[in-house]
Amino acid sequence: MQTALVLKRILVFSLTLALLMPVMAQRKPKNPAPAPVPTPSVPVIPGSGPNAMPSGNGSRSSSSSGPKAYNDVITDKAQTMRGLFTVHKVDEKYFFEIPDSIMKREIMAITRFTKVAAGAGIYGGELANQQVIQFEKGPDNKLFLRVTTLVSVANDSSQPIYKAVRNSNVDPIAVSFDIKALSNDSSGVVIDVTEFFKGDNQPVSLSANAKRRLGLGGLASDRSYIESIKSYPINTEVRTLKTFSASGGSFSASPFPSTSLPAASAAGAVTVEMNTSFIVLPKLPAKKRLFDPRVGYFTEDYTVYSDDQQKVQQSRFIVRWNLEPKPEDLEKWKKGELVEPAKPIVYYLDPATPKKWRRYLIRGVNDWQVAFEKAGFKNAIMAKEWPEDDSTMSLEDARFSVIRYLASPIENASGPNAHDPRSGEIIESHIQWYHNVMKLLHSWYFAQAAAVDPGARKMVFDDELMGQLVRFVSSHEVGHTLGLLHNMGSSSRTPVEKLRDRKWLEENGHTASIMDYARFNYVAQPEDSVGRDGLFPRIGDYDKWAIEWGYGYVPGKDEQEDNLILNKKYIDRLAKNPRIWFGTYEFGNFSDPRTQAEDLSDNPVKASEYGVKNLKRIMPKLPEYTKEDADRYENMSDMYKALYDQFSRYVFHVVRTIGGYYETPKSIEQSGDVYEIVPKKQQKEAVNFLHKQLFTTPVWLMDKNIINKFSNPSANQVSSIQENALSSMLTTSRLGRMVALTSRYDDAYQIDEYLTDIRKGLFSELGSKSKIDMNRRNLQKSYVEKLIGLINPPSGGSTGITISFGTLGLSPDVSKTDVSSVTRAHLVNLRNELSAASASYPDNMSRYHLEDLAVRIKRALDPK
């Protein structure tokens, strides 16, 4: 939902693919039976309890420089707790007893905030750091902690290339511990971890980026300590409190960049509480499922080397839970029978969640059961309330996936996951649910549905309506934690007129995927009598297919054979149901108008026309719909902004059509081209829409009876959106792309015709010599200045960045393309028209304006 960061994320993603593919150590794939969630030990550290054990009777002698006898280190005062690491607390010191059996085993260290100073834009439960580590014995009685930087792999240790890979890569040693003692049976070592966890060691502390966000300086050791350490069969949990000096950071990465941290300004220090979960990864990584760009999953990848290669192989695989049937049900599952998984996916609700919303969040999780049934599993996913009286459970425990409820003004929710980088297996997930997401939901639903749903025509929705809105967002975020990317192309599979067909909508929903940003059906008109079943998103055809593809049984003997089977299955299924299509938005293609955020249907122009109709119905009703006692027009201002933002979305959905092309990834077994041009007719319809709905002053958006209640007279919202749209229409990347498309496609929209269509619409008053209003004068000045900028760019070269699927490139230098030539010709023609029209224009302000434009163009064409 954080769409303002999309370009940055795509750039990093693309550069990472091209330059620094994360590569990881691979073992022979196998599907081990998932370990059941063990019953946690009763916490006894700090304190004592039934799990406390006497110290060992070791009598091994020790030298001053080497390990001591076990009972000299782990004395009879020790409070002990067994688990992944056996943890001992002796007085105020903590010791880990680490068995040889987990030496060099990959262990994921997941550090989360538990409490953060107010105002930071970061909340308890959010991820602070994540590393894969290994322990190994070193020389001189040392134990090393390495951070695994998984770079490259050779599968066959008998091949010479295997040695080359090992010789080329070494994992950094992050920490060195003195071995204090050996275990009684010499099957492990004892190390003192007190200062390690109290200190600022990055594998178990904050990343450099997190410190910048919080404006942190050095660690104040006298105000930092270990709160508790608890150990369980497959994980150990360490909770710490750390205090840092305040360096006065600006929170540049925070949703509130201008916020000063109250704790820093008040005390000159920042205190945070954190929990680090150490969870051992499986000895044998789960079987991988190879990535396919036609089905949207998060991925991991690495480089594979072998002696037989003629080029290096990039192995890219999806992120998913390791969902398997119970051993006794395996054959039934293979035959297509519904079976229960050995270990279902369970999400717990944060006990801080308001009770009125809990059932809706639970339903949002459980809604995915219908999708997992397509993969052959029943009761595969569920949500439960947190057992508040169970002191053995912790919200930060890495064995539990949690929907964390955050008391935050952020209007958002997010669904990250922690996964095994060797196989993509999801280990756990903490969904972040910010309390103020309900404000965002109210604004969306008001702007998109108030024309057809009377329940949306007020400032406080009833609990059932808001609960259903919460449920839909819950389902969307859970989808991310299952490994699914956004599918911004899904809504384009719905014909625009079907969005007004009540019966069809009740059967199919207005979009084929809840992973799309297709919030609510804004196309439906009041006369269509569409109910909420036709307005809300739901688990759709694509979602069911994506879960079947990612989690269902595939009878291949290895992942390569699985990939061939799934390729054929995809082609067959797509032929039967085009609604399972996945767009390339998440891979950086913003030139395909089928894959847009917040849009609906297969026709952006018609859908936006219907949307504008509904906005025009809502606008005059704002005083009625937003009225509350003693309100000082804040409600009206907020809802006006919601309508304005929605109108802006419609405008830019249409702009994306211009100079666009379609990208449909295919395998060689599929017919047709991967790349196709948006038909010229649709692009011209887009330009006509913009002239009619935006560039002809939208007076309905300037109702004085409304905007005079809250808007400063100097503000001009209409000019702002006109300016932004025109800027987008005339970017060098768009114009350069149109020129490039012309060279490949005979029916492309020529840039000469395009600029002519824009000019005729923007200067339509010249033919009739009618008065040019202020908004139109501003718009015409802006158009002329933008054309001048194209022939006389500030730096004389490239200005933008364009990204396509799998590629990254700069927009062209317009001085070396037809863009500059055509633009200059249009300025010459426009100057002549302006000069001829202004001589006898009856309106003084209009005449001054036209004369001014003519002079500007003349100076631009002949600066000397």
Image (spheres, rainbow, N blue to C red):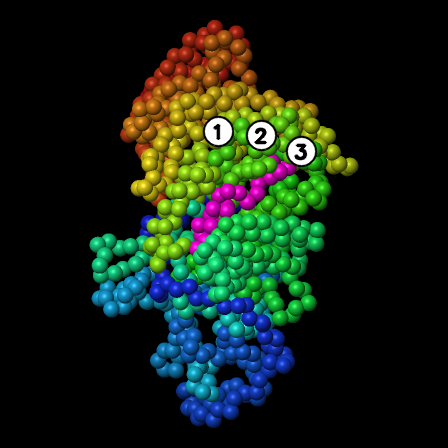
Is 705 placed above or below 295 here? above
User: Mark 3, residues whose alpha carbon is within 10 Å: few (<14), some, or many (≥20)?
Assistant: some
Which residue is under mark 3?
453
Q: Main secondary structure of the magenta part?
A: helix
- Circle nearer the N terminus (1, 3): 3
Instruction: Evaluate if marks 2 and 3 touch, with contact meaning CB atoms under 8 Å apart.
Output: no
For the point 29% across and 27% down, the residue is: 743
* Residue 539 position within the rendered picture, expressed as x and y whole percent measured from the top left: 55, 45
The residue under the point 57% across, 59% down is 346
Vertical order, 467 against 58 (above or below) = above
Badge 2 element? loop
| Mark pair 1, 3: CA separation | 24 Å
Work out whether residue 746 or residue 241 is closer to the camera in this orientation and state it: 746
Q: Amino acid at mark 2?
A: Asp
Q: Percent x, y for residue 184?
A: 47, 87
Q: CA distance from mark 2 to mark 3?
A: 16 Å
User: In this picture, which residue range is highlighted in magenta?
Assistant: 532-553
Q: Pick the residue in front: 162 or 68.
A: 162
The residue wearing badge 2 is 501
Quadrant of the snapshot with the C terminus: top left
- Under circle 3, the secondary element is loop
Could you tell me which secondary element the residue under label 1 belongs to? loop
As for residue 544 lying within the magenta part, the answer is yes
**Most foreground residue, 207 or 18:** 18
Q: Is residue 180 above or below residue 204?
A: below
Q: Residue at the far right: name it.
A: 629
Residue 118 visible: no
Q: Evaluate whether residue 568 shows in this view.
A: yes
